[in-house]
Amino acid sequence: MSVTRQLEAVRRTLPEGVRLVAVSKTHPLEAIGEAYAAGQRHFGESRPQELLAKYEALPRDIRWHMIGHLQTNKVRLIAPFVSLIESVDSARLAETIQREAARCGRTIDVLLELHVAREASKTGWQADELDAYVRSGAFGRMDAVRVRGVMGIASHTEEEAVVRRDFEALREAFERLRPAFGEAFDTLSMGMSDDYRLAVTCGSTSVRVGSLIFGERSYR
Ligand SMILES: *Cc1c(COP(=O)(O)O)cnc(C)c1O
């Protein structure tokens, strides 16, 4: 099936108000161009170098989301143009984004990535360490970082109850943290190709769908 048809099939399953981020990592410019022609504007990538190359080659009104683990020394590559960094998983990374955003004279929107899955390999804050960092007031001192919400990845399992539990934990964290940030804190990013429909029923406002739109790829 074509990218356009797959994209439209996914869109049909999303309620109004839920944003679709098309995860285009590993996929060529032509595939992204096809989705763009079908009206898609939000795209997700997980490697800074690849994100930069695609940004340079494609239309400027694309909204690029950084969704993969981001090393602090790579922030500078994407700071001038990235639309949303979804994978802020440490104080050091948040502080680096603050510095680089200020250097470019921008405010960068970010999500706080929370670790909820059972797998040890998944990145993200532990809930208690994130709560403590938020309580410290550190984000209040970052004038070039705007915290927009929470992102997370559910356990990779067929067991729906486990995946649901992970999504509910993300939703709870989102509600718990919201009063600390106010109005702009409006994004709960959860759900991928295999689980986005369940994520939406658990309150997701932004889903990150890759293989269902673009087909299989060589890395996760
Ligand atoms: C790759 C990736 C996705 C998309 O995964 P699919 O299963 O292809 O939909 C979503 N979120 C993150 C953080 C990813 O790294």
Image: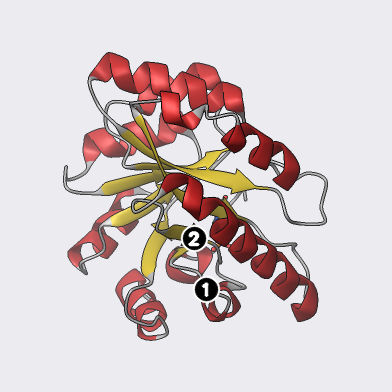
Report if residue 175 is visible in the image. Answer: yes
The amino acid sitting under disc 1 is Gly
Judged left or right of residue 60, residue 66 is: right
Q: Badge 2 is on which residue?
A: 188
Q: Residue at x 34, y 54 (%)?
A: 183
Q: Position of residue 75 (x, y in %)?
A: 44, 23
Dot 1 lies on which element? loop
Residue 2 disc label: none
Q: Residue at x 55, y 61 (%)?
A: 175
Q: Position of residue 205 (x, y in %)?
A: 43, 67
Q: Are marks 1 and 2 in contact (CB under 8 Å)?
A: yes
Dot 2 lies on which element? strand
Q: Residue at x 39, y 60 (%)?
A: 21
Label 1, residues with CA under 10 Å away: few <14, some 14-19, many ≥20? some
Q: Residue at x 27, y 48 (%)?
A: 63
Q: Earlier in the sequence, mark 1 or mark 2?
A: 2
Residue 203 disc label: 1
The amino acid sitting under disc 2 is Leu
